[in-house]
Image (cartoon, rainbow, N blue to C red):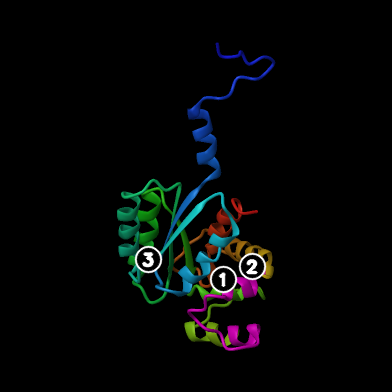
Amino acid sequence: MPRKSEGRTPSRGYSDRKVETRELRQIFLIVCEGAKTEPNYFRNFRASTTVKEIQVEGVGYNPSKLVQEAKALKAQEDYDQVWCVFDRDDWPKQDFNNAIANAEREGFKVAYSNEAFELWYVLHFEFLNTGLPRKDYIDKLDNLLKKKYKKNSDSIYEEIENRQSTAIKHAKNLLKQYNPCNPESDNPSTTVHLLVEALNKFIR
């Protein structure tokens, strides 16, 4: 006869364990406008944890088409969080605004930058509330990094990670200056910190 288990708390059912595991293993889909710059940055979060998965796609599409691609990818996999990452760039105002609205309608989250993703890097070093042409961000990063900034660098995350809390603080303070918020005209502004905070929640 099987021995009775005495003085032991009955184990939880399979479904309970499955729910708990699912909560710990948040699966992210991050769909980026850029083919290399943004994907190279976010892929470096992958090595920091074993409790989640991060799928990063660099699609090279305009914001509206990027959201459609995110929707197609979401239909293929059960992701916990879907993020769309894109810049204001020179995209038509309506395309930028529609992309944000469409993403939110699908339940996706948006990490936008106005006007360039490099604003997020600059905020690691200093607070910036004056809009700059894209080329000026590159020149500024050359000075801040004290070396030539490589746009498609796969090491930039490690190079500036120790300043990340500063960047988050600066990004939040920058957004506070816009009331009401209007992403297409709020230059400079970024919500990349929201995605970074979401990732950090599961790796720290």
Secondary structure of residue under mark 1: helix
Q: Disc 3 or 1, which lies upstream in sequence?
A: 3
Q: Look at discs 3 and 1 and give the one toward the viewer.
A: 1
* Residue 29 location (% of width, % of height): 43, 55
Q: Is residue 151 magenta?
A: yes
Q: Tag 2: Cα neighbours inside 10 Å, few (<14), some, or many (≥20)?
A: many
Location of mark 2 (residue): 167
The Cα–Cα distance between marks 3 and 1, rounded to whole angstroms, is: 18 Å
Amino acid at pointer 3:
Phe
Residue at image position (39%, 73%) is 35
* Residue 30 location (% of width, % of height): 44, 59
The Cα–Cα distance between marks 3 and 2, rounded to whole angstroms, is: 24 Å
Q: Is residue 168 magenta?
A: no
Q: Is residue 114 left or right of residue 123?
A: left
The Cα–Cα distance between marks 1 and 2, rounded to whole angstroms, is: 7 Å
Residue at image position (64%, 73%) is 160
Amino acid at pointer 1:
Trp
* Residue 84 location (% of width, % of height): 42, 60
Q: Which mark is residue 173?
A: none
Location of mark 3 (residue): 96
Location of mark 1 (residue): 120
Give the farthest residue toward the front: 1
